[in-house]
Amino acid sequence: MIAGAAAPAYAEEVEQVVNGGFDNGADPFWANGGMTIELTDGRACVNVPGGTTNRWDAAVGQNDIDLVAGETYRFAFDASGDAGHVVRAITGLSVSPYDTYFEQSPVLGDLTHYEYTFTASTSTAQGQVAFQVGGSPDPWRFCVDNVSLVGGVPPEVYEPDTGPRVRVNQVAYLPDGSKGATLVTASTTALPWELRTSAGTVVKRGVTKPRGVDVSSGQNVHTIDFGGYRHKAAGLTLTADGETSRPFDIKPGAYDQLRTDALELYYTQRSGIEIRDDLRPGYGRPAGHVDVAPNQGDGAVPCQPGVCDYTLDVRGGWYDAGDHGKYVVNGGISVWELLSEYEHNKGSRKVNLTIPESGNRVPDILDEARWELEFLLSMQVPAGKPNAGLVHHKIHDQAWTGLPLLPHLDPQPRELHPVSTAATLNVAATAAQAARLYKPFDAAFAARALAAARTAYDAAKANPARYAPASDGTGGGPYNDDKVSDEFYWAAAELYLTTGEKKYAADVLASPEHTADVFGPVAFDWAVTAAAAKLDLALTPNRLPGLAAVKAQVVKGAEEYLAIQRQHPYGVGYAPANNVWDWGSSSVIANNLVVIAAAHRLTGGDRYRDGLLTGLDYLFGRNALNISYVTGYGEVNAKNQHSRWYAAQLDPSLPHPPAGTLAGGPNSSIQDPVAQNLLKGCTGQFCYIDDIQSWSTNELTINWNAALAHLIGYVAETS
């Protein structure tokens, strides 16, 4: 926002809004939601009704706006409103599907001038400017004046504030671990550096190592190695080339609290249960999607038209991300990471997550994972129905909703989407894994899970090519995947580890994934699961023939990530082809580190622990943007992740995401309008912005936090 006078005019500038100063009445502006535009002191005002759900349920706007793709526009207006209320000011499409090309949501008060610049992504003669003011439980008054949309203005140049040029892990280094930093500089020769205490005392000196231009950022950089300093201290800083880093600590147990925080996110992501404010102060809310109006689910959810003739009770589970959808394949990999954190990191059994089930003699991490497991099992087609044993791919709203929108206020109809082989195998894998882990605590649940896993696996083998379509993306993400040999391998591996049965061992050994090098740029995620199988085969005691070869593959994969890390001046074990960073790159980096952690567990080699700790630094600030991608950790950290209920950026009465929430991170494809407008032409690490509307770079998801939790669990175990 630019407050004050309008920008200077250019000869080619063209005003698109008619009568934006309301000098000739209100036409051609319109109002919906039962509102009538009144002219007060030359401004257009409306009395906004209370009790609406979505922002667009009450709006003022003007249609028939011409927009030209690639043209830069200045969108300006003066607005006021009852203090604390929010207006969603948009430029978009006035007809279905009502695409939004640009939006901002200022918090109102006294009359203020607002001004923004954006570049149109689409040409249309059916554009609109609109001021969406719905979604408040209480009535209020909104006024607007001097509405302007001018084309032909110079494009805005976005320059992120990257702070000091010395980039460090802003949280902490372990006393006996590796310690590295990166200096951004024009110098091509070594430079002196100093490590100082919070009192300014120099405790270590050295010289930087020039590394040339870093491909992932386009920056000329040096690296700093201060691993020789092993003393516990708080508020340390590094100084080099006239710049001083953000402060950091050196201390043991530095990540113990994050181990808890990363897992506690799941409680506030729960569907189908009240989130108690006494357990999560500031995050309390009514239960979502329990068939209480305005919700329309999830107690008896029908299929999309033509998909099935039954309903399922799919209450519970975790909301997948910042929307209200629940997806089996993303839930599957998330559950696997939490259960693997439990199975392989013994300290996780004592972590207190402060959830309603705490104190029931079952480890909290298992209680939390079960909330999602019960949902996954509920998505399986019942016996006697067509496609019995297969699993529905997802359940979500019929249409997309806007931000912010708490789960219990979501008015959209809910729908089950078709079954898929991938979803079915996710249930087979995670239910089989659950069967061996829950047996000491609830034998009946373990038996039920194993029976569901067997049924799912058999159903998938009978239906090996039921793929979720890429086109099924209205109201929720498609999560399409047409390669499922990895899911078959994963499910067979988990069933073998739980049962020891020869038929599952035979399927593991016969899979093409078994001898393949599966540790590519992305070790594993919801669509790539063979590495999950190999990690559990390598780390879980079993008698699979040729097991030594599987363990060797895991170690070889870790060596590949270490080799990439050693070449990377930011210490990142991730090098995507053509420097095209993936959606959710933060979680990719975390999962690659999980492989390195597995190699450390298998071999005890110090280089794996050093590589693991070096890789952490990127997530906590040693990166091109000098930001920690974990909310609440580091002096400057991501806190505006895309979410409908952790939405303080849009509504100050709502919270930011909880501490320990991992942001998606740089994504070279920048699919959302905010990123497209501000980050066009970005290089690798710079393809990120901490804005709630940048869903392609700044989302939060259950699988990304699972990667963080899995990784930090091992770090905490070894610190």
Image (cartoon, rainbow, N blue to C red):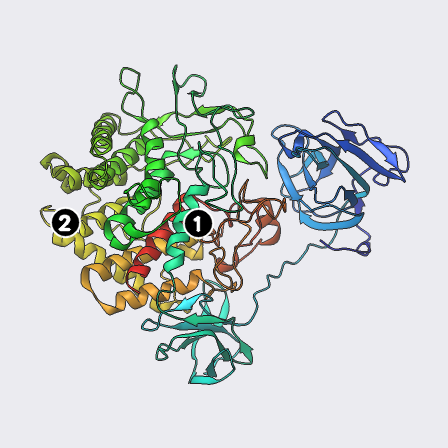
Q: Nearer the viewer, residue 549 or 84?
A: 84
Residue under the image location 86 percent in, 41 percent down: 21
Q: Whole-percent x and y of residue 185?
A: 52, 75
In this picture, residue 269 sits left or right of residue 426: right
Q: Which residue is mark 2?
A: 541
Q: Which residue is mark 1?
A: 584
Crowding around mark 2 (Cα neighbors within 10 Å: few <14, some 14 to 19, many 20+) is few
Q: Whole-percent x and y of residue 253?
A: 35, 65
Q: Whole-percent x and y of residue 199?
A: 51, 81
In this picture, residue 33 sits left or right of residue 500: right
- Residue type at mark 1 is Gly
Residue under the image location 39 percent in, 43 percent down: 355
Asked if residue 492 shows in the view, the reply is yes
Q: Nearer the viewer, residue 312 or 219?
A: 312
Residue under the image location 75 percent in, 24 percent down: 34
In this picture, residue 398 sits left or right of residue 367: right
Q: Reply above or below: 145 against 399.
A: below
Q: Nearer the viewer, residue 87 or 219?
A: 87
